[in-house]
Image: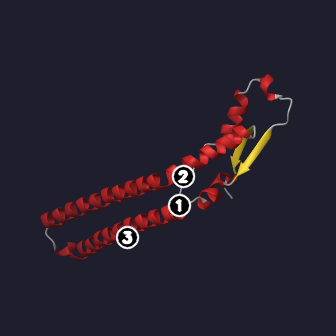
Amino acid sequence: MRFAVRVLTGGALLAALAAVPASAQAPASPTKIGYVNAQAILRGMPGYAQAESIYVKERDQAQNELDRLRQAFDSAVATFEQQSALLSASNRAAKQQELQAQQQKVEQRAQELSNRVAQKERELIEPMQERLASVIDGIRAEGNFAVIFDIGALGP
């Protein structure tokens, strides 16, 4: 699953620091920087396991449907290739058009399924992500942190 916490990272941190006036860059107290692994925290939140289970089920169903559609298309192409030498030029052209239309339908359905799965993920996970981001923002403000890095978003 994808995850994004609204904290400054990488170039955003540099841009934010560059935007701070020089007088504000030399505070009397030391600058506090925090670190979190937002993905790990998210996984531990109540309801996450159930939401992930629903998402995985939805994703797997979509993938299975897409696999069936692609197999049917591949089978139709293989049949055409076997029989194309026996078909007249007009029948061959008609069959090629049918295959192109079928391919377009498969591609369109793949896009629909992808959109549906992405929407389901947003419905299930986004509220938890927003709640976590709010908590992190609150901790940042309360603890007077200059920035909080999501170490899980920094990569391996």
Q: Horizontally, is 8 left or right of 123 in the view?
A: right
Q: How many marks?
A: 3
Determine if residue 156 is in view.
Answer: yes
Q: Position of residue 121 (x, y in %)?
A: 46, 56
Residue named by callout 2: 128
> Of the residues tagged 1 and 3, which is closer to the observer?
1
Residue drawn at the location 60% of the way across and 46% of the way down: 133
Q: Are marks 1 and 2 in contact (CB under 8 Å)?
A: yes
- Give the residue type at disc 3: Asn
Judging by the rendered image, the residue that carries numbered circle 1 is 47
Dot 1 falls on a residue whose secondary structure is loop
Residue 8 can be seen, yes or no: no
Mark seen at residue 64: 3
Mark before the other along the chain sequence, 1 or 3: 1
Q: Secondary structure at mark 2?
A: helix
Expressed as whole percent of the image width and height from the top left, the position of residue 131 reads 57, 48
Residue under the point 23% across and 59% down:
101
Residues at discs 3 and 2 in contact (Cβ within 8 Å) = no
Quote the CA–CA distance across marks 1 and 3.
Answer: 26 Å
